[in-house]
Amino acid sequence: MKLSGMFRLPVLLGAALLAPATLGAEHTSNWAVLVCTSRFWFNYRHLANVLSIYRTVKRLGIPDSQIILMLPDDMACNPRNAFPGTVYSNADRAVDLYGDNIEVDYRGYEVTVENFIRLLTDRVGEEMPRSKRLLTDDRSNILVYMTGHGGNEFLKFQDAEEIGAFDLADAFEQMWEKKRYNEILFMIDTCQANTMYSKLYSPNIIATGSSELDQSSYSHHADNDIGVAVIDRYTYYNLEFLETEVRDTSSKKTLGDLFDSYTYEKIHSHAGVRYDLFRGGAEAARKRLVTDFFGNVQNVEVDGAGNTTALEEELLSLSRTIAVLHHKADEEEEAVAAQRKNATGQAEVKASAQKNVHSVKPLTDENWWSKKVYGAAAVAGCTLLWGLSSYLESPGR
Amino acid sequence: MGNPLALAMSTQQPPDNGAANLESSSTSAITLSNNDGVQGKKQPPPEKPSDIRRRSHIILSFWLIVLCLGLPIWWKTTTIYRADLPLQEMLDWSDGKACRPVFPLHISIQANALQEHEAQNLLRLTQHALDDLNDFSGHHLRLQLAPPSAAGHYDRDSVLTIRLAPGETTTAKFDPHEPVLDITYPSNGIPSPTSSSSPLATYVAGQLRSAFAEEQAAISSLLSANSIPSDHRPQGFSPDASDALSKRPARSLRYAPTYHLTFSLFTSGPLPSSWDIEGAIDQYMKPVLDILSPIHNFTIDTQVQLYATPGVQNEVLNKEDLSSFINAAEWPLSPSIGGAPTINFIVFVGNQTIATLSQQSPGEGDDAPASASHSWLIPQWGTVYLLPLPHDTTHLPASALKQPLLAFTSHLLSLTGIPQSGSLPLRLSTLARIRSADLLLRASSTLGSLARLALALPSISIPRSVADGVAKTIKHLRLACESLGEPEGLAHARIAEAEAERAFFEKSMVGQLYFPDEHKIAVYLPLLGPVAVPLVMGLINELKAWRKRRWEAAEAGKGKKME
């Protein structure tokens, strides 16, 4: 045992050299998918939930191009809103969540289960603009926050349809298969929220929800002038933590600190956390920084000053000459090719024709003729039926 | 009863008309039973055998329609179309069984001062020395002797040309413009035909190895990241080199055939309001874009934004501030033009400076540069350049943009993932090879993902276009695998990757994948329940009646025999 260990040592050393390149524990971009799933004025608090998380991730540096915001309704312009053009998540109305600068990517009836799954799996058409796509790679950390009305293993979308826990799990699995994320923090605030993440099975996901099976998720308080509840308890206390403890991207607070701040007294339901999918389990997951998911981490590389410019100028003149050389060489080649073409024009044509034959053949190709025969048979059958029935109905019989 | 048709008929008619509609033969039966009221309850008239037969025909025809027409239609319309995918082949590609990426690199040697047999001998020895040094079978260096007629030209088909020339001492120097390595050797350095080793051969081999070390390391780390077994472990790397190696994939952008370059001028005040960016790009950046053109295309747009507030307002920016300098909330930096990924180059005119190392941490800043640096690179994103200007500048001429653009140019090269060391022509061809390996592996792993997905989700539909895409991908992967290390290799790998992505992200492969059983019952029961009840009941009644008739017939037969 010991001996084999010793033999392995050089290999391990080699692996250690490679490790930073291959392990890829570090993420290079942060994305946020913030989804509200309910419409109508009395669900004001759900939109306020999402908008306050949106404000937080933006405050911590995730640019709008990396935030996908789904809002099924426009509370700011609702005729019942006593404060038109604004959305508040607190009765003190200190922070207008709508502000001047908000980019809603999916709004109104665009917020559907299909669009949500399309977004996650990136199965979208050519016409979809880049701002509405989740262009993540295997080094992206994603925060997925959802809120709305849910039940046991489903979350309702817009009173019309629902997403099941299985669908969500399959979508995440497809993302993992295609290497579309490094780590995901899945956060959900609905009734019976913890059931939504119970079916997930893809690695590197930390999931947290507001309430257990058969538990409701409650709102925090209502604003009497607006007339409805303005925020849910779970989101409220998440925000409280993020606002007071995570002031900027340099904060060293961990997800463990965040999850420990949940208590039944505050939230009035049992918030749940799921660590088992994460690489390294609970211990590693709890050590992840809050800003790994809520903030945008950029490792900038400052240039040295001074002698670099000389190098760059050299590079420039070099590339200039190389470009000229390439151009010349290409011209020469073209001339040679043209000559050859003139000589062997006929042969070329033949060769290209043969190439076409070799190109791809579709795997299942229905025969054009068999389709025609089916059609003819159907028409003949119908005519026969009609003839038969008219014969049977004829009074002479 | 029980026949749906009969049910429908009887409910349509008012009850008192029922008797009148009965056939005349049964009226006598009614009057008869009326007359002897002692029998109690009135009995319906016996059915005629033809009616019984007609009823069983009706039931039979209903069942025939359901079974022969309904069932097939239901089956046909509800089955999910799944095109046949060559799953095993796809998995083979992703596991690296279908193709072992091998880069045969041809290096030609021009040794015009040597005799033919001397040159051959040197070549043989050098090749031996190379093979001894090389422990990575995927990356061959193959030497060949260039024909003497090609003197003065470098061989375009080989990766590198070595020009051997007699000189005072053994030296090696890369030609800056062409992929040529000039090696001089002292006259006594030529190995004798009988010797089994020569210092010159070892020297050349060592030079070659160090020239391709970074490429080898990059490719082998790519392979191992894709869990393709590679027996290569980079050895003898300085910590510096391995650090650069690990930084490369983190810094460089994902390969895309086209990149979109956005040049932005942000000013803290109203001035300067115009810049000669077009001229500056032509002068300082175009040449580099030109030499990158075989690998990437570039599209360019520019913008000027006045009164821009950066994310950090400090006069002196620390390293921590730099990462939040970009005001992502307010600066319009994601133009979302076309489908190409954007590289941002920002010139910021203001009075902010970057803290030098010594200012940041007085203890360790011994090697701090005297002048402050002006720019920083944001991995996978772009560059910011702080340009100090007098306050009354209204127009930025091209000459003022020289420094920023030179910085942008060198950053562009590192963003595209070009190797750090070596001569430029060699670095470019290395980039093409690394990218084609990268694309090949990416397309293969996408194929594997698609295959595993098709196996794991039996209810996902697989349209024909996906099968077509897979076929095309595999075809081009094969071609790419055969021509790795050549320009066509990159072209094929590029097509393969694009096709694989298109197949995986096929738009119609989405839908609600999972339906719980309760949902199915909830959908089918209201539809099929009311239809199925009369159908099934009719069949059961009919069967009962048929058995009863048979029993009666048997009884009657027995009775006859008894008589």
Image (cartoon, rainbow, N blue to C red):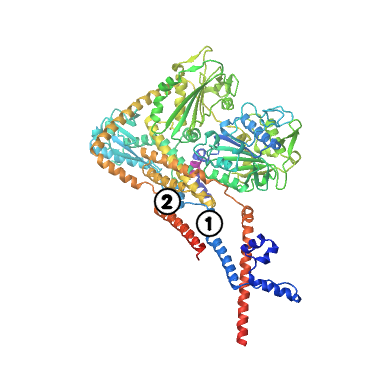
Residue B73, disc: 1
Specify the quadrant that holds the N terminus of chain B: bottom right
- Badge 1 amino acid: Ile
The Cα atoms of the two marked residues, 1 and 2, are separated by 25 Å
Q: Is residue B16 left or right of residue B246?
A: right
Quarter of the figure with residue B190: top left
Q: Is residue B563 left or right of residue B285?
A: right
Q: Residues within 10 Å of mark 1 (few under 14, many from 20)?
A: few
Marked residue chain, label 1 = B
Which residue does the image show at 41% across and 36% down from the upper left?
Answer: B213
Q: Residues within 10 Å of mark 2 (few under 14, many from 20)?
A: some
Front residue of B186 and B393: B393
Residue span colored magenta:
A10-17
Observer-side mark, 1 or 2, equals 1
Q: Position of residue A61 (x, y in %)?
A: 60, 30
User: Which residue is the site of mark 2?
Assistant: A363
Front residue of B463 and B412: B463
Q: Position of residue A26 (x, y in %)?
A: 55, 37
Magenta stretch encompasses residue A210: no
Quarter of the figure with residue A94: top right
The image shows residue A269, relative to residue B30, as above or below, that is above
Q: Position of residue B176 (x, y in %)?
A: 36, 27
Considering the whole magenta stretch, tell me its main secondary structure. helix
Marked residue chain, label 2 = A
Front residue of B334 and B292: B334
